[in-house]
Amino acid sequence: MTRVLPVLCVLVVVISVWFAASVPMNWSQAQALADDNASWTDIAEATQSLDRPLLPTPAQVATEMVTTLVDYPVTSPRSLLHHALITAWESLVGLLISLAAGIALAIGIVHVRTLDRTLMPWLVASQAIPVLAIAPMVVVVLGNIGLTGLLPKALIAGWLSFFPITTGMVKGLRSSDVMQRDLMHTYNATTAQVFTKLRWPASMAFLFPALKVAAPLALVGAIVAELPTGAQAGLGARLLTGSYYGLTLQIWAALLMAGLLAVLAIALIDGAQVLLVRGRGGRL
Amino acid sequence: MITTLLLLLSLLIGTVALVLLSRNDARAFRIATPVVFGVLVLWLWQLACVGYQIPFILLPPPSNIGVAIATHIPMLAADFRQTVLRSVIPGWLIGSGAGLLVAIALDRSPFLRRGVLPLGSLVSSMPIVGIAPIMVMWFGFDWQSKAAVVVAMTFFPMLVNAGAGLAQTGAMEADLMRTYAAGYRTTLLKLRLPSALPFIFNALKLNATLALIGAIVAEFFGTPIVGMGFRISTEAARLDLGIVWAEIVVAATVGTLSFALLSLLERAVTFWHPSYH
């Protein structure tokens, strides 16, 4: 309770401020639409239910979420769930690609000195580079050679999440204790045995934090990669069409849905971590 | 045929050179190895593009990108001014500054801290860049809306990191300050903020990249006809990839330089920190 109560209080304050702010933000629009003899209470009431408000109220966003989630079947392009699933799938495929590639590269870097010396400085430097900027180009170029749909978006999502996973796994595979490695050495353990019995289990404590950084990045990558293809499907497309046609409710609902997906991804990773800890008898 | 042979030969020589270079532990060799690798990649890229006559609309060779940079310097400078000087730097300063101030303010009330920090870390893991269309609606097409996106993107990482940093102060040091009869303000300035500096710099460096991403992506949602993100999205659609790569080179340089500058500043300000001894 001592953990939940403060969060709840802050949430209540945020939502109240949001409601309060929606009145002045939408005032001029509501006033323009109202009759000449409308009283100020009428206008204030009208600010709460505009079609294209400058700032939708929390209630309007919630209603929009519920109607677009419930009223249409998942297969319909008007269903928010349809778009959310597309984006989630793109991010997940991308995350799996980068997980496989990142772990493979990290294993190489840890065991081969040349790879370590040549690639690690570049991997560290890549954190300072806005790699997301290449997204429109990659999507357009892949579209030119006939690759459209899931793959370009998954590649961008994977490319973004690749770097934190690789650097995290390199740290993790090196995190085992020197004493323990010496012990394995006295057992005459092979490199493969040291890897499976010591390095790999020790790296898990670094893999999960890296995944928690990588999953939201993959989501951002998928959303941005959906922008340049003419906004066909996905949460990025909802944001872009909403922006073109001034459909503020659609933008807010898509944004909230993207946030929910990120929270869900983090919760799933946390859940997997808990399962792993249990399977190992209480330690990561 | 000749191209393939040349490629294989370069790859072989390059690999042998890298293996030999990486055997030496001297500082010069540690720097030379990744540089040689970078040069090798550029050389192979150039060779493959020219040799196999890969169309420029798929992958322009590095020489073409170099020419694009050299011939478009005024345009690149205008885009740099619009995106970096007008959106990224003000947004980064305001967002990081506000995050730091709020973290300090929250620090006085444990109740508020426990309420805000979990929400802050939740929000900082969300795709905040998606607010770009809303900000364009509120602040117009020009740089103000991009700076607003940058503020929103940089605020939460700083809030969470500075909050964690301020909570790091050791009980021993805090007790010592109490025995000196130091007030809240003195303790904050002399003990807690300095000990939070590594966390704050961490957030500043993280935010530098986030700010660039935020400004560039926000320009995908509508902008006047200048800016790095605008240029990237329109020239990609027109298949003029030399210019797109030129903008990416500029963005990567800005990101790396700001990271390096912040690291230097961090070293200068936190020279006392154990990690530098």
Image: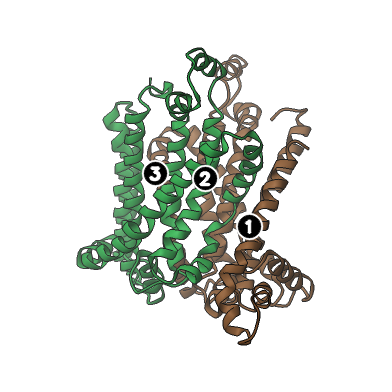
Chain colours: A brown, B green
Q: Are marks 3 and 2 on the same chain?
A: no
Q: Nearer the viewer, residue A185 or B10?
A: A185
What residue do we see at 29% from left, 55% from top? B6
Task: Check disc 3: other Cα within 10 Å, few if <14, some if 14-19, many if 20+.
Answer: some
| Chain of the residue displaying label 2 | B
| Chain of the residue displaying label 3 | A
| Chain of the residue displaying label 1 | A
Residue A40: name its quadrant. bottom right
Q: Are marks 1 and 3 in contact (CB under 8 Å)?
A: no
Say which mark, if any, is on residue B157: 2
Amino acid residing under circle 2:
Pro
Amino acid residing under circle 3:
Ala
What residue do we see at 75% from left, 35% from top? A2
Q: Which residue is mark 3?
A: A125
Q: Is residue B112 above or below residue A176?
A: below
Say which mark, if any, is on residue A17: 1
Q: Nearer the viewer, residue A179 or B195?
A: B195
Q: Secondary structure at mark 1?
A: helix
Mark 2 vs mark 1, CA separation in Å: 22 Å
Q: Nearer the viewer, residue A81 or B13?
A: A81
